[in-house]
Amino acid sequence: MEQLEVTLVQAGWGVTIPISWETAVTGPERFYLVPAPALAVKQAMVELETKQPANRLLDIDVLHEVDGVATVINRQAVDAPVRKCLICEQPAKACGRARTHSVAQLQQRSSELMQQVLAAHEQSQRAAWLAQQAERALLYEVSTWPKPGLVDPVEHGAHLDMDHYLFIDSSLSMTNYLTNSALPACISKERI
Ligand SMILES: [Zn+2]
């Protein structure tokens, strides 16, 4: 849901959430109202569904109004290939209809995909935490006084082009850089 909302916002489309079932026994489900051309939204959603392997578990339907009826737009309308089976890459509907794979096989494959997402989420959380610690260190450092020759809240020392507010702004501008720097170490856990 977070990825979907970021996609919509980055596309420049405002979005409202009229209804949401986050604890439904069938899995979380949510409706969005998107004031944008339906085919463009469908195109963006197909791209999101195929962006990474686990996104194939998402089922994002785009509906628009045709003669007063909410109608689903299919993938062919945006020249996208039909959904592939999670296991054998054949069209998903064909495998579903023929029951080519057992429920246990499908559950196993779904679990693997979800584990990948959770691991990636954990890695990015850890990288964000490390970046936060680095920024905290920068802000503590500039707050320390006395510190002869260096920038602090009382004086800018030898740095005529810097004061402590500019130092704070500079530190905060580094968030993405610090997070990206920390990420490789978080992906291979043994290095931390
Ligand atoms: Zn299959």
Image (spheres, grey):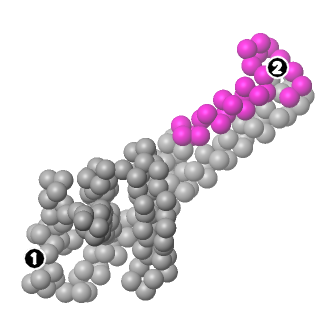
Q: Amino acid at mark 1?
A: Ala
What residue appears at the point 48 percent right and 73 percent down from the top-left corner? 20
Outermost residue on the front side: it is: 67
Where residue 11 appears, as percent x and y from the top left, is 39, 45
Examine the structure image and report whether residue 176 is included in the region drawn in magenta: yes
- Label 1 vs label 2: CA separation? 70 Å
> Which stretch did the figure color magenta?
153-178
Whether residue 92 is visible here, answered yes or no, is yes
Instruction: Tell me the residue at 59%/35% (across/down).
Output: 174
Q: Is residue 50 magenta?
A: no
Q: Quick check: 147 left or right of 70?
A: right
187 left or right of 154 in image:
left
Where residue 144 sits, quadrant-wise, is top right
Nearer to us in this view, 59 or 161? 59
State the residue at coordinates (69%, 31%).
169
Residue pointed to by mark 1: 94
The label nearer to you, 1 versus 2, is 1
Q: Amino acid at mark 2?
A: His
Q: In the figure, residue 91 lies in which quadrant?
A: bottom left
| Residue 69 located left or right of residue 131 | left
> Looking at the rendering, in which quadrant would you find the N terminus?
bottom left
In x, y percent, where is residue 152? 83, 27
Label 1 CB-ligand 1 distance < 8 A: yes
Percent position (x, y) of residue 125?
54, 57
Q: Which residue is painted at 12% across and 83% down in the image?
A: 97
Q: Are marks 1 and 2 in contact (CB under 8 Å)?
A: no
Residue 121, numbered circle? none
The answer, for residue 189, to whether it is visible in the render is no
Q: Please name the residue that numbered disc 2 is placed on.
A: 156
Residues packed near mark 1 inside 10 Å, few (<14), some (14 to 19) or many (20 plus):
few
Q: Determine crowd level at label 2: few under 14, some 14-19, many 20+ residues with C-alpha closer than 10 A.
A: some
Secondary-structure class at tag 1 = helix
